[in-house]
Image: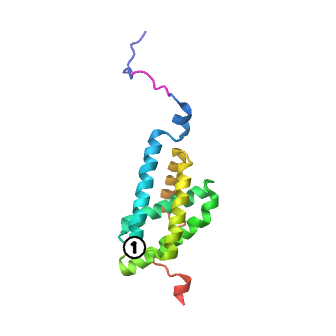
């Protein structure tokens, strides 16, 4: 009989709650991550609403809206799709103005659309598993990498061409 050459690795991992471990769920780690994500999203929105927002705040909100749109396509809150589309248009208008004025500000209607969309996104985020968040984030990154459904901020609006 030959001697074992494999080093002892210790006892195997035994899951206390297999449903949470293998299928995601609202685990403690997800809950704390959710709380910090919502806090940073609302801080960015507050900065934009007060007129002290910058490119980082705009980028944070744009990422949240992109995540929300991808989640609606994945069947998570499809009833909010129109709200997220309106918010996406508001973000696009905001960054186009920022290129001219160097200030990231929303108009009244855009601010209203963003507030509605952000509260709907909060509802989306509180009702899903961590694995769903990861899938949506991976899809957003894939779309950005391959430039799928990406709007250029330098293109003219149809009404600006005239």
Of 156 and 44, the residue lying toward us: 44
Marks counted in the figure total: 1
Q: Which residues are magenta?
A: 10-15
**SS for callout 1:** loop
Q: Residue sitting at 40 percent across and 63 percent down?
A: 44
Tell me the quarter of the picture where residue 124 sits. bottom right
Of 2 and 130, the residue lying toward us: 130
Q: Residues within 10 Å of mark 1 (few under 14, many from 20)?
A: many
Q: Residue furthest top?
A: 1
Q: Is residue 155 left or right of residue 100?
A: right
Quadrant for the N terminus in the image: top left
> Taking 67 as reference, is 54 above or below it?
below
- Residue under numbered circle 1: 104
Res. 60 visible in picture: yes
Give the color scheme: rainbow, by chain, secondary structure or one colour.
Answer: rainbow
Q: Residue sitting at 44 percent across and 41 percent down?
A: 29
Residue 15 on image: x %, y %: 50, 28
Q: Is residue 30 left or right of residue 8?
A: right
Q: Residue sitting at 40 percent across and 60 percent down?
A: 43
Quadrant for the C terminus in the image: bottom right
Residue 127 on image: x %, y %: 57, 48
Residue 113 on image: x %, y %: 53, 69
Q: Main secondary structure of the magenta part?
A: loop
> Taking 88 as reference, is 34 above or below it?
above
Tell me the quarter of the picture where residue 78 sits. bottom right
> Taking 51 as reference, is 29 above or below it?
above
Res. 59 visible in picture: no
Query: Does residue 60 belong to the magenta stretch?
Result: no
Q: Residue sitting at 37 percent across and 76 percent down?
A: 103
Residue 94 on image: x %, y %: 45, 74
């Amino acid at each position: 009989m030959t001697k074992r050459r494999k080093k002892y690795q210790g006892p195997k991992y035994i899951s206390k709650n297999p449903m949470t471990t293998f299928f995601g769920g609202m685990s403690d780690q997800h809950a704390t991550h959710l709380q910090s994500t919502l806090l940073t999203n609302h801080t960015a929105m507050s900065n934009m609403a007060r007129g002290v927002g910058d490119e980082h705040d705009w980028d944070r909100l744009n990422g949240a809206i992109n995540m929300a749109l991808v989640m609606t396509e994945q069947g998570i809150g499809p009833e909010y799709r129109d709200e997220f589309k309106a918010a996406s248009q508001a973000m696009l208008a905001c960054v186009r103005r920022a290129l001219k004025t160097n200030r990231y500000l929303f108009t009244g209607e855009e601010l209203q659309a963003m507030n509605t969309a952000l509260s709907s996104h909060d509802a989306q985020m509180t009702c899903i598993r961590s694995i769903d968040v990861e899938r949506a984030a991976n899809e957003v990154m894939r779309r950005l990498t391959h430039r799928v459904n990406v709007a250029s901020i330098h293109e003219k609006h149809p009404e600006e061409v005239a």
